[in-house]
Amino acid sequence: MKNLKHTIGLIFLSLTLGTAFGYAPRNKEEINNSGIEKFLIDKKDKDNNTVKIALLLDTSNSMDGLINQAKAQLWDIVNQFSYAKCGNGHRPNLQIALYQYGNDGLSSREGYIQQVIGFSSDLDEISEKLFSLSTNGGEEYCGEVIQTSLRQLDWGKNPDNLKMIFIAGNEPFTQGKLNYRDAVTNAREKEIIVNTIFCGNYQQGINTDWKKGATLTGGEYMAIDHNKQIVHINTPYDDVIIKLNSKLNSTYISYGAMGSAKLELQARQDNNAMELEEAVAVKRAVSKSSGMYKNSSWDLIDA
């Protein structure tokens, strides 16, 4: 089990900010043979097929590139999981939570930390929260934001669930009153894997304990150039997919108190993706056509 979680951690980490590592999209056959598939193939209980991911993003000054990459790669993450199939035919449940830290606009009493959204499968809402983030100078306390996510989020006690934290930033991992070793030890006791992404030189991240923060829980450490331009490969089908996405939107039948607002949110996130880059809009459209895009709380067809 530990080795399989280790493999999935690598896959997800490469997707989180895939273009920063020069990630090349894989075909469907390769994805089906990945660690995700191996982890889920023997699961017979649908409730156990849950992957919980907490993204902890540094939103201090100079981190605009990191936020833009996170916005762009969200749909790659969703599409990766949409290919995974469990032994009983069910797809995994993907829940994502989002924190920002190191921002002067946040409360100093809270350690410049904010839960932007708790664990959610509402992809439109997650996208909206990502696009709401802005950077501002501040103090980056890695140990404290990890500990806060452990305390505030409902991680559950099911040992078969895959639970991971991904923390990204560019200041020493040792900053703050709370020792990061205590925080990652608490994560390990809860069977939560901590993966670290240092935005800068690889060796500098090692020297400032970003690697230790990951390895203490069996997680992975990587360093990226967060200001590297996102590169997407256009295909002849992009325009067709975008047109089909508009037709797909017309198939939703809203109901209840949230229906109208959720339809507007859906359209707003389509626009956000398109404004970021056409290729991002294509990836979002693919995600919307998959079983990972669930709207049963407001769409009559899904319900």
Image: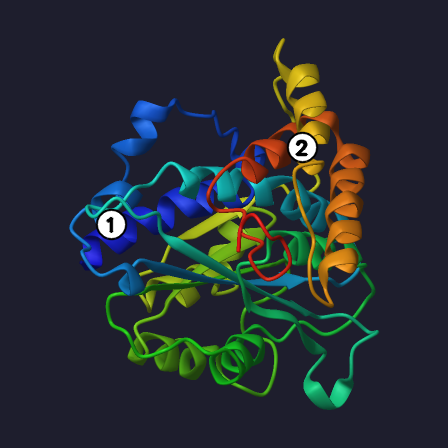
Hey, which quadrant is residue 58 in on the image?
bottom right
Residue at 80 percent across and 60 percent down: it is: 135
How far across and how far down the image is residue 149, in percent? 53, 77
Q: Label 1 belongs to which residue? A: 40
Q: Determine whether 81 is above or below 232 in the image.
A: below
Question: Which image quarter: residue 192?
Answer: bottom left
Q: Residue at x 58, y 54 (%)?
A: 295
**Quadrant in the picture for residue 113:** bottom right
Instruction: Residue under label 2, please give it.
Output: 280
Which quarter of the image is occupied by the N terminus? bottom left
Task: Give the Cα distance between marks 2 and 1.
Answer: 28 Å
Question: Which residue lies at the image location 74% right of the left edge and 39% below the top edge?
Answer: 270
* Front-lying residue, 187 or 179: 187
Left or right: 25 as drawn, with respect to 245: left
Residue farthest along the bottom direction in this orientation: 109
Q: Residues within 10 Å of mark 2 (few under 14, many from 20)?
A: many
- Mark 1 Cα shell of 10 Å, populated few (<14), some (14-19), many (≥20): many
Element assignment for label 2 = helix
Which residue does the image show at 67% across and 48% down from the upper left? 253
Q: Is residue 276 left or right of residue 86?
A: right
